Amino acid sequence: MSEEFIEVPVIGRVVGGHTGRLDDFKGNTESVIRLNPGFPEETLKGITEFSHLQVIWHFSERSRHDVALHARSPRNNPEWPETGTFAHHNHRRPAGLGMSFARVLRVEGLDVHVTDLDADDGTPIIDLVVVFREFLPRGDVTQPAWPGEMLRNYWKDAGERP
């Protein structure tokens, strides 16, 4: 694998919310995206007029050894088909980046309070941008059955755990 690297800034961190790198039960948990102190508060002006932010974050607790450049069954479940690295949404991809569509609750100074951010407490934030409906996928979004099966508990409340 030929690698080329770029540097990206960490603009802030997740405060509160999820811990423990859980696979499911990510719903209804409030967390804060805390921008670094060097940012002027005006960089957040206007975001509360939007319902959601697209948040790019880094799987910072992974190691280089976690990268899996081969086909494998999601969550190692043999009932689901082996799929390649780029058909997975997890820390095993080469760049180690995650993306979430977090719901904006409010802004206080450099703190953006959100829900439905599935990054853990302490996670470095690379970028955030408001969601424009016009930039969402055009046309029908299709997928096989296994992601729906795998993620049926993903956005359930942590209190709904069996």
Image: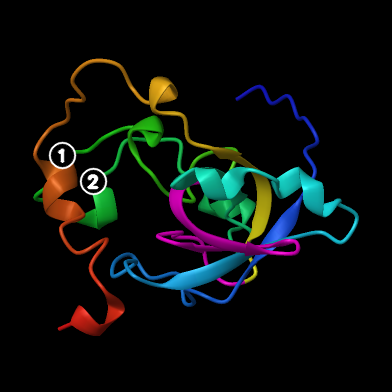
The Cα atoms of the two marked residues, 1 and 2, are separated by 5 Å
Q: Residue furthest right?
A: 38
Magenta region, main secondary structure: strand
Name the quadrant containing residue 61. Answer: bottom right
Instruction: For the residues labelled 1 and 2, say whether their Cβ atoms are less than 8 Å apart.
Output: yes
The residue positioned 49% from the left and 43% from the top of the image is 50
Residue denoted by label 2 = 73
Secondary structure of the residue carrying tag 1 is loop
Name the side, left or right, on which 45 lies relative to 119.
right
Which of 151 and 49 lies nearest the eye of the viewer? 49
Name the side, left or right, on which 12 lies relative to 131.
right
Can you see residue 98?
no
Name the side, left or right, on which 44 lies relative to 87.
right
Residue denoted by label 1 = 81
**What span is colored magenta in the figure?**
99-121
Which of 99 and 60 lies nearest the eye of the viewer? 99
Is 58 rendered above or below residue 142? below
Is 95 rendered above or below residue 107? above
Where is residue 151 drawn, in percent x and y? Answer: 21, 55
Residue 112 painted magenta: yes
Q: Which mark is residue 89?
A: none
First-in-chain label (1 vs 2): 2
Where is residue 52 drawn, in percent x and y? Answer: 45, 46
The residue positioned 44% from the left and 22% from the top of the image is 135
Secondary structure of the residue carrying tag 2 is loop
* Mark 1 residue type: Pro
* Mark 2 residue type: Ser
Where is residue 161 drawn, in percent x and y? Answer: 20, 81
Crowding at label 1, few (<14), some or many (≥20) Cα neighbours within 10 Å? few
Q: Residue furthest top?
A: 139
